[in-house]
């Protein structure tokens, strides 16, 4: 590791693409980027980094799968590198605070932060609900923390007990603001934001998959003259995902799914249903047919969900059957297929679902089962993704 040289990280220049080399990033950060195998910036990185690295606030309309996490983490880590502290801050007093709506997302961000900072001294701690509070408290108390990642409720707990102080926060990241709104977290988030220094004295990076009026109001109150960046949802969806729509009867869906697993190279797949009961029914059906799969739904205990997700990530489990809420924050590379057992009512969910595959430039396939009921949801999806879809009778079956 000590012998690493920037010259070892060769990425040819390509017209229309930015390399991380073009941003004068700290050497240990470049080394981590090389180790992670990133070569070119994703669109959100290309557009956000010039501003975020120059201390401007950024509001970004981007979904998971676009590389937004690396965009804000690179900005934060570069800030630390360029402004080393003369003296360490007391424990529980982070320099950067990252707020995320769900444990899954917070843990993913923690993983990315650790990956990107692996050759730096920066320390990351993640505090999330549903997991051992005492252990998180010990982590906070043990040593100073540079990056604190948390879900709002648990962070409020720590603030109330004076285990965390936000007085020294230089950079505040708010991720998936629209979901925080949907989940009713905004009052908590507001209390947290007000404990950080005034927005003139901190940098704020604000991300949301959608920007409706409510989200915009939050962005306005927490940022100063931000650079607003939009990464079109179609970008995520259509560029790297081959979208198939299968005309299929309601009662043929179970069999179709079985045969799909048997006949197609579905190395790692997520099947989305619209409701939990359907998820559980489908898991039972598939398990009876000796298909190894697990459910990922909101009523499953957190611990079990994380264990399932880990097995899926590590390739010990090929199939996940998920609801939208549980499946939204999944960032797992190498998902070859997303199957919509049912079409979602909300076209945004459709884009979120299929965005689980085809991530970061890899190719993926989505297969949507379109039965009589699903057909009602199709026009809205077509409008949202900006193209007419072709429903076919599948040859594969
Ligand atoms: P995110 O949208 O932050 O969830 O990132 C999606 C995935 O893309 C993650 O698995 C990242 O590790 C990966 N990723 C982020 N930036 C890049 C990049 N520039 N090149 C390749 N992969 C990337």
Image (cartoon, rainbow, N blue to C red):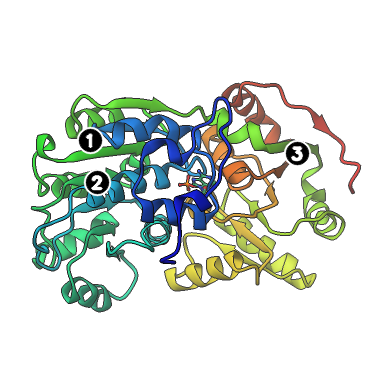
Rendered view: 181 above or below 221: below
- State the residue position of label 3: 371
Q: Find out whether the residues at labels 1 and 2 contact each other: C-beta distance under 8 Å.
A: yes
**Image quadrant where residue 116 sits:** bottom left
Compute the Cα span from label 3 to label 2.
Answer: 52 Å
What element does badge 3 sit on?
Answer: loop
Compute the Cα span from label 1 to label 2.
Answer: 8 Å
Q: Nearer the viewer, residue 233 or 93?
A: 93
Q: Find out whether the residues at labels 3 and 2 contact each other: C-beta distance under 8 Å.
A: no
- State the residue position of label 1: 55
With 110 as the anchor, is 334 left or right in this view?
Answer: right
Residue at 34% x, 69% y is 130
**Image quadrant where residue 322 sits:** bottom right
**Residue 330 in sight from this viewpoint:** no
Residue at 80% x, 58% y is 261
User: Where's the N terminus, which quadrant?
Assistant: bottom left
Give neighbour class at mark 2: few <14, some 14-19, many 20+ (Cα, 10 Å): many
With 188 as the anchor, is 280 left or right in this view?
Answer: right
């Amino acid at each position: 590791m000590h012998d690493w040289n920037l010259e070892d990280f060769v990425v040819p220049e390509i017209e229309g693409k930015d390399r991380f080399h073009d941003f004068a990033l700290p050497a240990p950060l470049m080394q981590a980027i090389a180790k992670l195998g990133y070569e070119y910036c994703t669109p959100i990185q290309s557009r956000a980094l010039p501003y975020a690295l120059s201390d401007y606030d950024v509001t970004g309309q981007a979904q998971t799968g676009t590389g937004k996490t690396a965009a804000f983490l690179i900005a934060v880590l570069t800030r630390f590198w360029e402004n080393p502290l003369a003296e360490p801050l007391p424990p529980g007093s982070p320099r950067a605070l990252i707020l995320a709506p769900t444990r899954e997302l917070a843990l993913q961000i923690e993983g990315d932060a650790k990956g990107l900072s692996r050759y730096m001294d920066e320390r990351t701690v993640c505090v999330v609900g549903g997991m051992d509070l005492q252990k998180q408290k010990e982590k906070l108390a043990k040593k100073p923390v540079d990056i604190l990642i948390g879900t709002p409720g648990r962070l409020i707990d720590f603030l109330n007990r004076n285990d965390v102080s936000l007085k020294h926060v230089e950079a505040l990241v708010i991720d998936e603001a629209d979901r925080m709104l949907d989940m009713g977290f905004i009052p908590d988030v507001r209390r947290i934001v007000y404990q950080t220094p005034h927005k003139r004295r901190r940098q704020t990076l604000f991300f949301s998959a959608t920007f409706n009026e409510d989200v915009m109001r939050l962005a306005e109150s927490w940022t100063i003259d931000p650079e607003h960046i939009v990464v079109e949802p179609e970008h995520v969806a259509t560029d790297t995902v081959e979208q198939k729509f299968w005309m299929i009867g309601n009662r043929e869906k179970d069999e179709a799914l079985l045969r799909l697993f048997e006949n197609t190279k579905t190395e790692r797949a997520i099947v989305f249903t619209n409701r939990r009961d359907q998820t559980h029914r489908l898991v039972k059906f598939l398990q009876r047919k000796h298909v190894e799969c697990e459910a990922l739904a909101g009523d499953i205990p957190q611990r079990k969900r994380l264990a399932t997700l880990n097995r899926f990530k590590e390739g010990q489990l090929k199939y996940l059957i998920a609801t939208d809420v549980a499946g939204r924050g999944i960032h797992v590379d190498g998902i070859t297929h997303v199957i919509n057992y049912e079409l979602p009512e909300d076209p945004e969910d459709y884009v979120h679902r299929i965005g689980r595959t085809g991530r970061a430039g890899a190719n993926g396939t989505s297969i949507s089962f379109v039965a009589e009921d699903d057909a009602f949801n199709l026009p809205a999806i077509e409008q949202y993704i900006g193209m007419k879809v072709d429903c076919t009778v599948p040859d594969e079956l």
